[in-house]
Image (cartoon, rainbow, N blue to C red):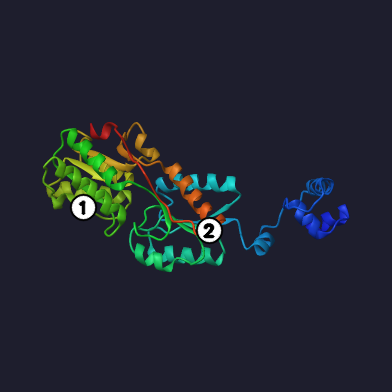
């Protein structure tokens, strides 16, 4: 049978209100009474009822996390940072995976709202960010992670995608490559626009032609990079170096190139973005742009906690932009 405040009150012979104040470290309880109550609670293995506590305080000590692809190693690392920080603060996480589908993202937000979570962290799908802003629940703090509109009314933590795209492409140029392609996904996403802009900035800096035929888009999955490079090589016109918008696309490019008998990087150099664990495997050795994924998650939760615990003060939104780092491995030199 579950131990309740009533049981503790019966044993200690004090009122329910006094037991509650003692357990919640409130004022108005004598030291000896508090000690008596805490000792009885420990003896009876008392566990607070989170639902009851939530009804009283109008808090559930839970946070919703909405991510687009649990199979992409980037997002679990971000989620781990969020969960680590949430655990220290006494919050639980409800995880929703949208599979890059807008409809599932919308449904996840509605379910989390019905579950009365105290806040929501969203790594949004690539499109319809303006619409997403409109359907987000009022009164529940929201923080965007990984991608966010610059004019969003919510706090966010993102990477400097333009700088990351520039670093990746500039590295390939300095390594001697001139015919450099870009593989990204999907259209109308902020990360695409920004990383593509960084790619073009590097080409312009070195007075290189931007070949639109070498800019190919699909989705964020490995199969996309695989299919695009095989199609381009099959057509006879393909870049001798590729900057892929994420590491999964880059891994697909490497796989497709090798199946066609091409050497990486001798025939096709490849640079990715994210620095997922697979990138450092000896048989892959992918040059990539490193994002501080775990730190990104921790910062996202800290931003959310700030808004959850101080709703009345009107804390201004914050946009935290983290700096990317180029990690050079064998795939590009």
Q: Position of residue 325 (x, y in %)?
A: 33, 37
As drawn, the label of residue 31 is: none
Give the labeled residue for mark 2.
313
Distance of label 2 from label 1 (alpha carbons): 47 Å
Disc 1 secondary structure class = strand
The number of callouts visible is 2
Of the pair 238 and 31, the residue shown nearer to us: 31
Figure quadrant of the C terminus: top left
Q: Is residue 262 visible?
A: no
User: Residue 207 vs residue 314: left or right?
Assistant: left
Quarter of the rendering containing residue 273: top left
Q: Is residue 302 visible?
A: yes
As drawn, the label of residue 216 is: 1
Query: In percent of the image, x 61 and y 59: which residue is there?
Result: 60
Q: Position of residue 164 (x, y in %)?
A: 29, 43
Number of residues whose C-alpha sits closer than 10 Å to that of mark 2, classed few (under 14), some (14–19) or many (20 or more): few
User: Residue 284 vs residue 21: left or right?
Assistant: left
Name above or below for residue 216 compared with residue 267: below
Number of residues whose C-alpha sits closer than 10 Å to that of mark 1, classed few (under 14), some (14–19) or many (20 or more): some
Of the pair 325 and 224, the residue shown nearer to us: 325
Query: In percent of the image, x 40 and y 41: which residue is there?
Result: 292
Of the pair 235 and 188, the residue shown nearer to us: 188
């Amino acid at each position: 049978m579950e131990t309740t405040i009533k049981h503790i009150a019966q044993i200690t012979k004090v009122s329910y209100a006094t037991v509650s104040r003692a357990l919640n470290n409130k004022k108005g309880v004598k030291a000896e009474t508090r000690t008596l109550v805490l000792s009885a609670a420990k003896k009876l293995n008392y566990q607070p009822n989170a639902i009851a506590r939530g009804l009283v305080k109008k808090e559930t000590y839970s946070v919703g996390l909405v991510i687009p692809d649990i199979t992409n190693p980037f997002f679990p690392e971000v989620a781990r940072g969020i969960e680590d920080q949430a655990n220290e603060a006494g919050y639980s996480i409800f995880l929703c995976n949208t599979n890059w589908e807008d409809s599932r993202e919308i449904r996840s937000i509605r379910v989390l709202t019905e579950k009365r979570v105290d806040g929501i962290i969203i790594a949004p799908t690539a499109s319809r960010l303006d619409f997403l802003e409109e359907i987000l629940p009022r009164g529940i703090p929201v923080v965007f992670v990984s991608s966010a509109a610059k004019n969003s009314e919510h706090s966010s933590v993102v990477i400097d995608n333009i700088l990351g795209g520039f670093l990746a492409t500039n590295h390939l140029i300095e390594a001697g490559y001139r015919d450099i392609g870009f593989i990204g996904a999907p259209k109308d996403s902020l990360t695409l626009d920004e990383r593509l802009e960084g790619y073009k900035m590097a080409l312009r800096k070195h007075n290189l032609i931007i070949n639109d035929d070498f800019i190919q888009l699909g989705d964020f999955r490995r199969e996309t990079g695989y299919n695009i490079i095989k199609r381009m090589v099959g057509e006879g016109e393909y870049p001798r170096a590729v900057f892929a918008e994420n590491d999964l696309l880059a891994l697909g490019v490497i796989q497709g190139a090798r199946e066609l008998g091409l050497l990486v990087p001798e025939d096709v150099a490849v640079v990715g973005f994210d620095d997922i664990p697979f990138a450092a495997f000896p048989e892959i050795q992918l040059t990539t742009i490193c994002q501080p994924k775990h730190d990104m998650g921790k910062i996202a939760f800290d931003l959310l906690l700030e808004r959850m615990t101080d709703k009345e003060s009107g804390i201004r939104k914050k946009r935290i932009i983290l700096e990317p780092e180029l990690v050079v491995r064998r795939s590009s030199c």
